Structures are given as structure tokens and as C-alpha cells.
Image: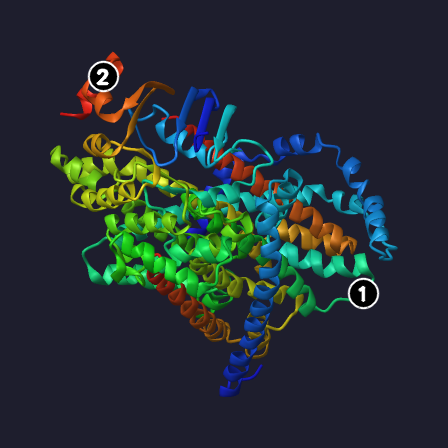
Amino acid sequence: MIDAGSTAFFSAIGACLDPQIIWLLVSSVPGGLWVSAIPEATQRISGHLGLRVDYTFRFRDVWRHQDLLLEGAVLTLQLSGSAIVFGVLIGVLGAGMKTSQFRQLRWIVEVYVEVIRNTPLLVQLFIVFFGLPSLGIKLDAITAALITLSINLGAYLVEIIRAGVEAIAKSQIEAGLSLGMSRLQLFRYVILFPAVKIIYPAAASQFVLLLIASSVASLVGAVDLFHAGAFIESRTFRSLEAYLVITAIYLVMALFFRAAFAGIYHVVFVRR
Amino acid sequence: MRELVTGDFIWLLFAARWTLGLTVVAIVGGSLIGVIIMVLRVVPLAPARAVAIAYINVFQGTPVLGQLLIIFFGIPILTGANVSPWAAAIVSFSLYAGAYLGEIWRGSVQAIPKTQWEASASIGLSTMEQLRYVIVPQAFRISIPPTIGFWVHLVKDTSLASILGFIELTRAAQIMNAATFRPMTVFLTIASIYFVICFVLTRLSARLEGRLRVAR
Amino acid sequence: MSLVEIENVHKSYGQLEVLRGVSLNIDEGEIVAVIGRSGSGKSTLLRCINGLEPIQSGTIRFDGEQVNAPKTNLRQLRQKVGIVFQSFNLFPHLTAERNITLGLTVVKKMPLPEAKEIARKVIVQVGLEDKLTAYPDMLSGGQQQRVAIARSLAMSPKLMLFDEITSALDPELIGEVLRVLADLAKDGMTMMLVTHEMGFARNVAHRLVFMHDGEIGEEGPARAVLDAPKTPELSSFLGSVLV
């Protein structure tokens, strides 16, 4: 069921991320031009440092697999985008449960948050992908990665969201209550906007971290961007070039989304 | 395929020393680099700041997996020397930790109110003296909880060194799983080991944060 | 020669001009109170005197030395000019005693026992001899401010600057701080204080300066100025503070 749901979700996001459209943008930058300058520069620098280099960078071999890189990048974005949606849902739910009057609910959330935040993402992924089948739950690599990333992100967001809501001054809430607002009105008009304003920057940086960390999905065989790097390495034996290129693509994506999130913040929260 | 025996769990437990060892060495190396990055980041010299910002962006904006593999394949190519997975992991995690620690410490120094600089300047302290007697002692206290918080991240991130074949906790678990095919047991075991290490550090950090909030 | 000579000083933050040609002399032993609305430039003027705020034009001389000249050793100058801030600005990680001795041992290179001797003397002066080992967060606002005064006094300054030092205090704590100031005045300390305490200015200050829109609106003997304001600006200001 999860699988069907996530597939539908992927195709929805995929529609916005049509590889052909992106490719038009990417290929407008003449890749061969800038990468061909690198070997000479490297040799010059190493020469100055007294290092001997008889290695010629061959980025062209990697670049030849641009379609794989693009497909990988698209999957990485789809995977991260979906994990962010589910992660936010989990985070909101968890933060809500944490303010519940039932001790058991609060305790469950606390255990969840502590367990996830104090264990490596990679191990969590291994438990979901390799461990769950022994309980009869078989998941493909992408679904396993999506579940793990969502659960992981959710744990961090619970704390961020809770802290954001708690940061709204008591005096504000008292002022709202003195105006005779109901709890719902109070949340809608007094708490929501300032809380989201506090939560947003921390959450946005978690989103970018998630995009980068999603590369672990390749270690269980999801054909994301990092996996494309490994595949190209095995085809071309240009290990360094392959990983330099995909790492650079991650960097570009991270910087782009960081700037985009900051821009959104500026438009939504600063101009008021 | 064979059965899991008690000795296997002890073997896993002992593999944790490589996780801890890698973390500690990366903390030492990362702290040295972090100090340099922090200084470059605050000096009134635009090119220095640009270098520091670029460094921070690269190491905070790329997957640790990519950093590990680039170092692992890059060092032999640039230096002609062969590099062991252990050495590559140390270099990689030190560079990575340096970017985060440098930023944490810069934030701590900049969190000290301007009035503290003014008050110490007003009794005639030089910039170095202001730093040494007034700013750094306070910044140090502020920085302890986030610094330990980053150590927790580092412990978890060292699991990625398994990609180089470096046998720390996660790699050991993979090997154990291949031999016994008891993935749930094996991975839950190492998750618990990670949890104990990280939870102790997390509690310590939270405790210090509470205690240090009383400014002194 | 006056101890402080301020000549036609201009200062702006970007577009905003906060001091628009201020000239003022302060003689040794004189007590000058500066009053005015917030934003009139009174605190800025005070902070220019020990070089905390750079100025764009004009000159400020202290003890014959030009404060705003590039070759001036501000560190040496600041040892002779004590300043006390509105928000105390004690060093929170140090005891009251260490707050006081820090400048003595580090800047004046005084041996610690000697510095401690001075710390004891000045802490008695502000009436807090039992708080020497206390940290700032263990002290009330009034006590913190008195330690801050002691910290400045320890450097044996020739001039003391007070920047609205009672504004952040609860009303019942203001008295203890003003009493310390009155004692200092009796001892003949040269002082310049930015204040909202009109009664105190009237009784203790020799001269009163009214700042308005970055300029000196009116100045003269404290009582005379307060009792018979000449300008409508001062009248209206006094009307608004003396309810």
C-alpha cells in the first residue's frame, strides 16, 4: 500500500521535474569546457607543492553518462521531496502528541525521538531494508529509503516544531485569551504564523541536510544520484572524476535549495 | 551460514572501539581545522572570509559518502602515496568536522553581546586581551553543548566510513550479517551500541546546557 | 585648558545625523549633567569621548590629547576615562573582585595582591564590601551597577562618564546608586552624566546641558537652567518629564 502511494507521489513530483526540461537547462552549460581546464591546473598546483602527478583527469568519460546522472538526480529530488512531506506530517503529529495530556503518548514520542536521533541513519536504513524482511515485510530499496528518511527527518522536526510553538510568549497567549479567543482561534491567529516563522529556518536546513543524507539510499541499491556515481565508476574506472562530479551536483543542489528556502523566508516572513 | 554465538556480540562490541577511535581522532583533527576556519571566518579580510565560507559550504553541502570517496581516491592520485581506508577516513572526517566546529565556535563568539567588547575596551584591554579574558571564556561555555551535540553527529556519521571497507561498528555488522544472515539481530545490536554512546553524550550536552545557562 | 574639549563634532549613522556640531568643555572637578529626549544624541556624545563611537568631523580632546586622531593610543586614554553603562555590562563569568582587578593586572600590569587591595578599597567606597566574591548573577541590579562603578573607579580615572546608569533599575534600587554618585561628587571627581533624574541633576551637577536634535539646545548652571528654561523645547521636555 505504501508502495502504491509513494509511486503515485513520485509521479506527481516527477511531472514537475521532467528530465527533458531539466536537461535543456543543464546542457546549455558546455560541460566539456570547464572540466577540461582542471587537469592542467591540478598538475600546476601539485608541481608547486613538490608532488609528482602523472594523472590526467578525464571528466569526459563521466560526462558521457549524463543521462544516468540526470535520472539519479531526479530520483534523489523525488525521494527527498517525498521524505520531506512525510517527515513534516510525522513531525507535526509528534509535536502534537508531545503536548498531549496522556503520559503514554508523550512517552512514545520521546522514545521515538531519542532512539532515532541517537542512532545512525545508515543503520536505520539497514534495519528497514535488511531487517524487516525477516519479519515478512519486504520492501524495495526506494520504499525502504523513503520510510527511513521520513522517520529520521520526523524525529528532528518534532523537536524543532515543539520548540517553535513553545517559543511563542505566554504573554501573547494571555493577550489572545483575554480577547475571548477560543483555543482554535488562538492557534489560528496568535500562534500559527509566528511559530512557523521560528520553525521554518531550522526546518529548512534540516530539509537540505536530508537531501544530502539521502545519498545513503544508494547503499541499499536505490538508483539515486550517488548510485549513478558508483555505476559510472564501475563502467569507466574513473573513480575520482565520477565522485567529484556527483558530489559537485549535490553541492549545487544544496546551495540552490538553501538559497531558495532563504528566498521563500524573505518573501513570506520578512515583508510583513 | 552459521549461528550467532555470544562471542559474535562481544566481537561487535569490540568493533565499537574503531567507531570511537575514528570519532576521537576526527574531533582532534577537526578542532584544529575548526579553529583555523573560525579565525578565517571573522578576520576583517574579505579573501580569507571567502575561503572559509567556501570551505564550510563544500563540507556542509555535500554527502559525507562523496567526501570519503574523493579523499580515498584523490590522495593517491595527488600525492602518489597509497592511502589506507583508516587514513582516508581520518582525513575526511577531520575536514568535515572542521567545517562544523568552526561554525559552532564562530557563532559562540558572536553570541557574546557587543556590550562585553565595549566594557572591556573601556578599561583599556587590547583586542587580544579582550578575547583572552572576557570573550573566549564566555564563548567557551556557550559552545560546549553544541560542540558535544556535533560529536554525537560525528559518532553516527562514522558509520559511513564502512563504504571504504574500514571495519568499524557498521562494517563489522555487515560482515557478521553476511556470515550468519540474522540482519535484524545484528543491526539492532549495533543500533543499541550506537544508542548508548550517543545517548550518554546527548544527556551530557543537555545537562551542561542547563547548568551553563546560569551565566558564569 | 579644560579636561575635555569638544569642538564642532558631527557624527552620523549612515544617513541619520545624530550629532550636528556639538561644542562643549568640561573643566577638572566639574560635574556636567546631560539631559534630553531619547534620540537627541546625548548618549552618543558621551560615548564619543572615550572613543567608543568614531566621529566624522570636529575634534575631541581629553587631557590635551586628541581622541579622534588615528595615532592616539585609545587603550592608554581609556585607562584615564571611566565609563559606566546603563546595562552594567559586568563580566558575568568573573567575580566582583575579578571584574575590578582585571584592568589593573592586565592593563596596568599591577601585581595581583596590590590590585586586590585596590579592589577592597573601591568596593568599600560603593558599600559592597561583603560582595567581593559574588558573581554578577548573584547581585541585584543596583548592586551590579555599584560594582560596575567600582570597576571604573579602580583604574583611578581623571573623568567618569555615566550613561543613564539608573534607567535599567527598579525604582527602589535607584537611590543606592545615586548615593554613590553623590559621594564621588563630594570627593571632587570630574563627571559627565547622561540622566533622567532631574532632581539629582539639579542638586549635584554644576552645569546642565540640554541636548535637542543632535545639538546643544541650552546649557548653564543646573538650577538656573531647570528653573527658568529659555527655549520652548526645554520647557516642553521638562513638562513631559516632571509630571
What's the CA distance linking mark 2 and mark 1? 85 Å
Tell me, what colour scheme is on the image? rainbow
Around disc 2, counting alpha carbons within 10 Å, would you say few (fewer than 14), some (14 to 19), or many (20 or more)? some
Give x and y (percent) for residue A187: 23, 39
Residue A27 lies left or right of residue C163; in this view the side is: right
Q: Quadrant of the N terminus of chain B?
A: bottom right
Give x and y (percent) for residue A68: 67, 45
Q: Nearer the viewer, residue C28 or B6?
A: C28
Q: Nearer the viewer, mark 2 or mark 1?
A: 2
Q: Is residue A174 above or below residue A115?
A: above
Q: Amino acid at mark 1?
A: Ala
Give the residue at the far front of this rendering: C1
Give x and y (percent) for residue B12: 53, 79
Q: Quadrant of the C terminus of chain B?
A: bottom left
- The residue at which mark 1 appears reads as B81
Disc 2 + disc 1, Cβ < 8 Å: no
Q: Nearer the viewer, residue B195 or C74?
A: C74
Residue A153 lies left or right of residue B158; in this view the side is: left
Q: Amino acid at mark 2?
A: Pro
The mark found on residue A102 in the picture is: none
Question: Residue shown at 21%/38% (left/top)?
Answer: A172
The mark found on residue C229 in the picture is: 2
**Chain designation of label 2:** C
Q: Nearer the viewer, residue B118 or A262?
A: B118
Q: Can residue A145 be seen here?
A: no
Residue B209 lies left or right of residue B128; in this view the side is: left
Question: Residue shown at 26%/56% (left/top)?
Answer: C128
Question: Residue shown at 43%/69% (left/top)?
Answer: B195
